[in-house]
Image (tube, rainbow, N blue to C red):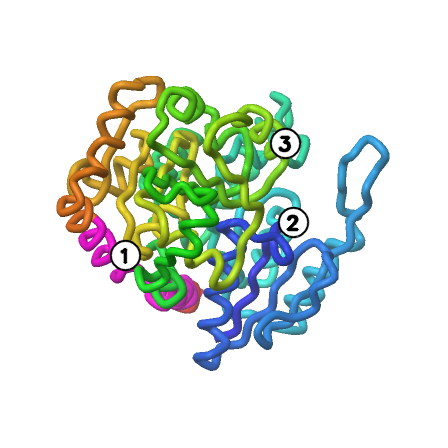
Amino acid sequence: MRIMIVTEVFLPATDGLVLRLTEAIRYFQKNGHQVVVVTPYKGIDSFEGAKVYGISNKKFPIGKELFWRPSLKKIYELMESFEPQVVHIANPVIMGKFAFQYAHSLGIPVVVSYHTNYERCLKKYRLDRPMAKKWVWKMRREISSAAALNLCTSYAMAQSLKSYGINNVHVLNRGVDLDKRHPRFASEDMRMILSRGKTDKKLLVFVGSLLKRKNLEALLPMMRRRDDVCLAIVGDGEYRQVLEQAFSGTDTVFTGYLTGKNLSEAYASGDAFIFPTVDEQVGLPLLEAMASGVPILAARSPLTIEQFCDGCDALFFNIGDEDALDEVIGCLDDKETMKKMALIARHEAESNSWEGASQQLLDYYSIAFTRASHYN
């Protein structure tokens, strides 16, 4: 199958959308499919044998980045020359709008997918003013109503899309690298690093981008109150300096970005993975922690309620309820129960391989192409 993926976020970015797309592209290429990626130009020309076409944009002094219409016309030319059997538009904004119009004019079926918090996405592109938001959602509804299929990454996100007037949404399976995230990576050396040598304390690990919306400051009262807990915050981001100042004087370690074996060991070496974020619609680090065989302590939210069963494969607490947080941390002393919980989580993660998630996406492409071929 010839597949064109149009996305306004791609390498060298490292968020959940990019991870899902790169894993899918790797799977498609390995299985003999032809893939091209259309994305804003970031100096990447290819990935795993798939050609990456960069669309140039212009950055203005006020900070906005805008596409020139002539540069967007390149998408049409690529569609004509590559003749894709399906066009996949991820998180449609500006490029997605034009890609949809071009695909529609050429009779190519379109699959649309949504992967992120839409308000944050609009803010990123300076489109969070009332008139701009109204235009963006009007455009998205037009695209999604005419798309062969609409996809998203959770049932919570599907409900959110429905509130914006986007219906007939299918939920994509989650994916995790079961070899890179595995209990065998538990390391006493890494535990020593993450706890600054205080290995007798309970080690809680968070992995993710350091942004305000991650709500890590909700853990600060606990870290100031308890002397039996260490916290390791793995990742980087625009809010890191604020967090480092806030957590100064507590047993908290900021590691910055970790990759490869170091990241695998960080996931697997704590007593629990802690997740205080309530504004999240994907939550890939949660699945990676499950695969790593550690208990999950998660703030109750639409996403975590969807993904976990409280007391079975995770323990929930309500943000702001310090007694509830103390209670779930106290459960870590029950080693036998925590071991069973971690085993259940690993077993559940094993049904969420990237190969399975990528094959499901390929199946959706086939459905879109078959429907278009039948009705045309």
Queried whether the magenta region covers residue 251, the answer comes back as no
Q: Which mark is residue 95?
A: 2
What's the CA distance linking mark 1 and mark 2?
Answer: 34 Å
- Provide the major secondary structure of the magenta segment: helix
Q: Which mark is residue 241?
A: 3
Queried whether the magenta region covers residue 358, the answer comes back as yes
Magenta-colored span: 342-370
What's the CA distance linking mark 3 and mark 2?
Answer: 33 Å
The amino acid pointed to by label 2 is: Met
The amino acid pointed to by label 1 is: Ala
Residue at the image point whose x is 19% and y is 40% from the top = 309
- The residue that mark 1 highlights is 349
Label 3 CA crowd tier, 10 Å (few <14, some 14–19, many 20+): few
Residue at the image point whose x is 60% and y is 49% from the top = 96
- Mark positioned earlier in the residue sequence (1 or 2): 2
Image depth: mark 3 or mark 2 in front? 3
